[in-house]
């Protein structure tokens, strides 16, 4: 059984969902430490003037919190801002009307944490893309340890035999622990072609909403990497 473990992100790019689609079980690493100026509470959309950040404000933290403990700041009009900017830059997209209302209804719900909202939006995007991967939360698995050790313990709790990691984790993952625990380690390949897109030259690093609004039911056809994942330890 193949599994992936990644922090909840706000309306992530398509590679995030390609990774989810590549595994049997996807774990939202919701009890990892919250990191500022990161993907947990922001992502980019494409505009006629280039890319634009959409950022969800979080409550001021007097101490280090986990992602699932980090509250959203509802004291500003950020929801209206996000909905309006998405309408402004995607209302001309062929499939905007098909999905915009559902997205708006989800983002307008009150959430107890940034993690809760991220996961709700990701589940909706998975449904739109036809991704059937089983989902669970790391906080439900009671796994302990630091970095690679905790990943190994989560995988053991799931009964996973293969771990698919994002390539950015190469710098801290200890491959020897995977060999020692007889778990295959793979790194995800992110190699994508363009899809129909508004506003000039193609930009692939933006939120997956861009692909959904522009490609609609064909978005699934543009989801998969053209290169195979790399086996690092077996």
Image (cartoon, grey):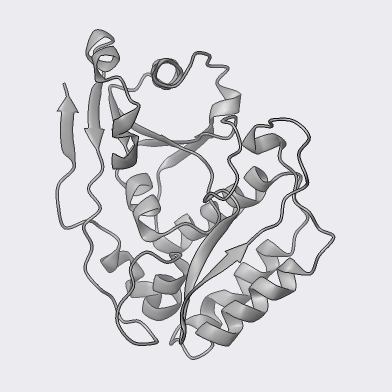
What is the tally of numbered marks visible in this picture? 0
* Of the pair 35 and 78, the residue shown nearer to us: 35
Q: Vertical placement of 38 versus 172: above or below? A: below
- Quarter of the picture containing the N terminus is top left
* Of the pair 134 and 144, the residue shown nearer to us: 144
Residue at 16% from the left image edge and 32% from the top image edge: 231
Q: Position of residue 6 (x, y in %)?
A: 45, 38
- Quarter of the picture containing the C terminus is top left
Q: Vertical placement of 166 versus 137: above or below? A: below
* Of the pair 68 and 172, the residue shown nearer to us: 172
Q: Position of residue 20 (x, y in %)?
A: 38, 46
Q: Is 157 left, or right, of 178 in this rendering?
A: right
Residue at 69% from the left image edge and 30% from the top image edge: 64
Q: Vertical placement of 135 versus 204: above or below? A: above
Residue at 55% from the left image edge and 21% from the top image edge: 141
Q: Position of residue 112 (x, y in %)?
A: 76, 44
Q: Which residue extends farthest bottom?
A: 92
Q: Position of residue 160 (x, y in %)?
A: 34, 23
Q: Is 185 left, or right, of 100 in this rendering?
A: left
Q: Which residue extends farthest right?
A: 75
Q: Quadrant of residue 130?
A: bottom left
């Amino acid at each position: 059984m193949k599994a992936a473990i990644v922090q909840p992100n706000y309306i992530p790019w398509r590679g995030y969902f390609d990774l989810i689609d590549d595994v049997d079980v996807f774990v939202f690493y919701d009890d990892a430490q919250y990191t500022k100026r990161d993907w947990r509470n922001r992502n980019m959309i494409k505009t006629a003037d280039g890319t634009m950040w959409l950022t969800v404000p979080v409550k001021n933290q007097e101490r280090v919190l986990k992602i699932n403990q980090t509250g959203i700041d509802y004291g500003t009009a950020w929801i209206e801002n996000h909905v309006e900017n998405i309408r402004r830059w995607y209302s001309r997209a062929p499939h905007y009307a098909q999905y915009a209302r559902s997205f708006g209804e989800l983002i307008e719900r009150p959430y107890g944490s940034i993690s809760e909202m991220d996961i709700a939006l990701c589940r909706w995007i998975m449904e739109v893309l036809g991704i059937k991967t089983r989902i669970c939360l790391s906080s439900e698995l009671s796994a302990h340890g630091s970095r690679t050790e905790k990943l190994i313990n989560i995988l053991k709790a799931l009964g996973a035999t293969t771990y698919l990691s994002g390539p950015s984790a190469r710098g801290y993952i200890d491959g020897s622990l995977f060999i020692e625990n007889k778990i295959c380690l793979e790194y995800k390949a992110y190699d994508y072609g363009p899809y129909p897109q508004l506003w000039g030259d193609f930009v692939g690093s933006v939120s997956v909403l861009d692909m959904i609004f522009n490609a609609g039911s064909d978005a699934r056809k543009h989801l998969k990497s053209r290169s195979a994942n790399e086996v690092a330890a077996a």
